[in-house]
């Protein structure tokens, strides 16, 4: 890459912190949920930065925003980006870094005199976190054709609002049909949100694949009875059955690449001296290998069936989400590795344990991701932190990779 093509480090880092100030409450906690007033403020700021950079701005019906460097070409655009909506009490890097890094890349190309052979786009996808509206990664899922836009727009949020109405209210219900522009490739740079890069002392991750994600709600029904007078052998204890499932899941994934989590649990009647007559909990099961992931799901089904017989309980399940593992484009992954090596950044191939917009975009175009380290592996938390040098380094690798793609060099 020519030496005159450089990232404006000051602009990148100051924008990250400016965007991170939008959506803070009186206590300083950052919450910028999709289609909220805070999201509107963040979107307005991004649009202003896009326009300052000479990009054409368009918005599609699901509220995805695109900043486009228009180039007359028959080649489909290179798209980069992520999201700016957050979880509750969030950090400042998740999603936002990918959007602002992409903007910095286009600015560097323009100021450095790069002559791309195709347009470039910065994407800002709606409702990636899925906190206010489900499912998560909604904007990119709709864009990739995995969810009908009209169906998504009627989604009712946790606060009773309707997504389509809220997008209209904040001024981001666009006219462009999601997916109208199919990119030639999509690249997302992101903080790792995990500890691997930091533990291994690597500055860069070339993300080669992404785990399959399976979410399920399990409800176990037993019999409520007195905790003191009911002998153990005569109990139908929904709480005990739930504990057996949790223990089973840990054993199922031990010493493997799979991970399983019971993240929420509820007992009823939830009284200290009453045997639970129901337990309701969620299961999050992930693995990067499709066959292994499906085998784990089948094993859980079989275990629940046996548990009904052995413990005398009844069990109901509801699938909440199912996204298959994704293998990213090998050519782009190699470009990322080469770009890191050229700049003498230590790099490793890795799997993403979290879901990202790139997961959805891989359905329609060659896709890959770049990771930079997260301190202590912390994310979705005010303590989320990545060093400035790593943020700039990741953006340099994105710039190098994007330049290789759009110039053929």
Image (cartoon, grey):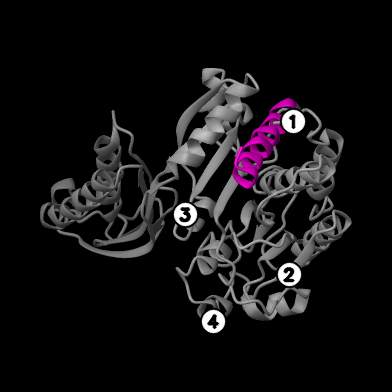
Which residue position holds label 1? 2
Q: Of the two numbered discs 3 and 4 on the same chain, state the one appearing first in sequence.
A: 4
- Residue 91, placed above or below residue 73: above
- In the picture of the structure, the residue carrying the numbered disc 3 is 362
Residue under label 2: 58
Q: Decide: marks 2, 3 in contact (CB < 8 A)?
A: no
What is the crowding at mark 1: few (fewer than 14 residues within 10 Å), some, or many (at least 20)?
few
Real-space Cα separation, disc 2 to disc 3, in angstroms: 22 Å
Asked if residue 404 is among those painted magenta in the image, a careful observer would answer yes
Badge 3 marks a residue whose secondary structure is loop
Q: Secondary structure at mark 2?
A: strand
Q: How many marks?
A: 4
Say which residue appears at 55% left-offset and 28% top-offset: 338
**Residue in the foreground of this view, choosing between 10 and 316:** 10
Which label's residue is closer to the chain start, 2 or 3? 2
Instruction: Give the spatial CA distance, label 1 vs label 4.
Output: 46 Å
Q: CA distance from mark 4 to mark 2?
A: 19 Å
Disc 3 versus disc 1: nearer the observer: 1
Image quarter of the N terminus? top right
Please state which of residues 383 and 325 is positioned toward the viewer in this rendering: 325
Q: Main secondary structure of the magenta part?
A: helix
46 up-or-down from 9: above or below: below
Structural distance between the alpha carbons of marks 2 and 1: 31 Å
What span is in magenta?
389-409
User: Considering depth in this image, is 347 or 13 the residue closer to the camera?
Assistant: 347
Above or below for 230 versus 156: above
Q: In the visual, does 4 lie left or right of 196?
A: right
| Relative depth, front residue between 198 and 112 | 112
Q: Which residue is mark 4?
A: 150
């Amino acid at each position: 890459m020519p030496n005159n093509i450089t990232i404006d480090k000051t602009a990148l880092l100051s924008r990250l912190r400016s965007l991170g100030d939008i959506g803070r409450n009186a206590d300083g906690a950052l919450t910028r949920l999709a289609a909220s007033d805070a999201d509107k403020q963040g979107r307005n700021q991004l649009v202003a930065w896009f326009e300052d950079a000479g990009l054409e701005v368009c918005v599609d019906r699901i509220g995805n925003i695109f900043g486009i460097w228009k180039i007359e070409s028959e080649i489909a655009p290179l798209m980069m980006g992520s999201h700016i909506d957050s979880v509750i009490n969030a950090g400042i890097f998740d999603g936002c870094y990918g959007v602002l890094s992409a903007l910095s890349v286009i600015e560097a190309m323009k100021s450095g005199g790069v002559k791309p052979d195709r347009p470039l786009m910065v994407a800002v996808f709606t409702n990636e976190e899925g906190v206010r509206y489900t499912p998560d990664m909604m904007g990119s899922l709709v864009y990739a054709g995995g969810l009908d836009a009209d169906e998504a727009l009627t989604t009712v949020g946790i606060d009773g609002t309707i997504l389509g109405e809220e997008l209209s209210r904040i001024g981001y219900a666009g006219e462009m049909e999601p997916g109208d522009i199919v990119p030639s490739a999509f690249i997302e740079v992101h903080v790792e949100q995990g500890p691997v890069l930091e533990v291994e002392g690597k500055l860069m991750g070339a993300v080669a694949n992404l785990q399959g994600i399976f979410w399920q709600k399990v409800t176990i029904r037993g019999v409520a009875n007195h905790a003191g007078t009911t002998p153990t052998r005569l109990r139908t204890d929904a709480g005990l059955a739930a504990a057996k499932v949790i223990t089973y899941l840990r054993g199922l994934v031990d010493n493997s690449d799979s991970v399983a989590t019971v993240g929420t649990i509820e007992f009823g009647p939830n009284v200290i001296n009453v045997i639970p007559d129901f337990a309701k909990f969620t299961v999050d099961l992930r693995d990067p290998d499709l066959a292994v992931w499906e085998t784990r799901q089948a094993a859980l089904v079989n275990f629940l069936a046996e548990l009904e017989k052995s413990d005398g309980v009844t069990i109901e399940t509801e699938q909440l989400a199912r996204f298959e593992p994704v293998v990213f484009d090998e050519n782009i992954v190699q470009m990322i590795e080469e770009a890191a090596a050229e700049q003498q950044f230590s790099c490793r191939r890795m799997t993403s344990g979290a879901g990202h917009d790139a997961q959805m975009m891989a359905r329609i175009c060659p896709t890959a991701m770049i990771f930079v380290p997260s301190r202590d592996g912390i994310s979705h938390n005010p303590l989320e932190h990545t060093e400035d040098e790593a943020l700039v380094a990741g953006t340099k690798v994105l710039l190098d990779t994007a330049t290789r793609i759009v110039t053929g060099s």
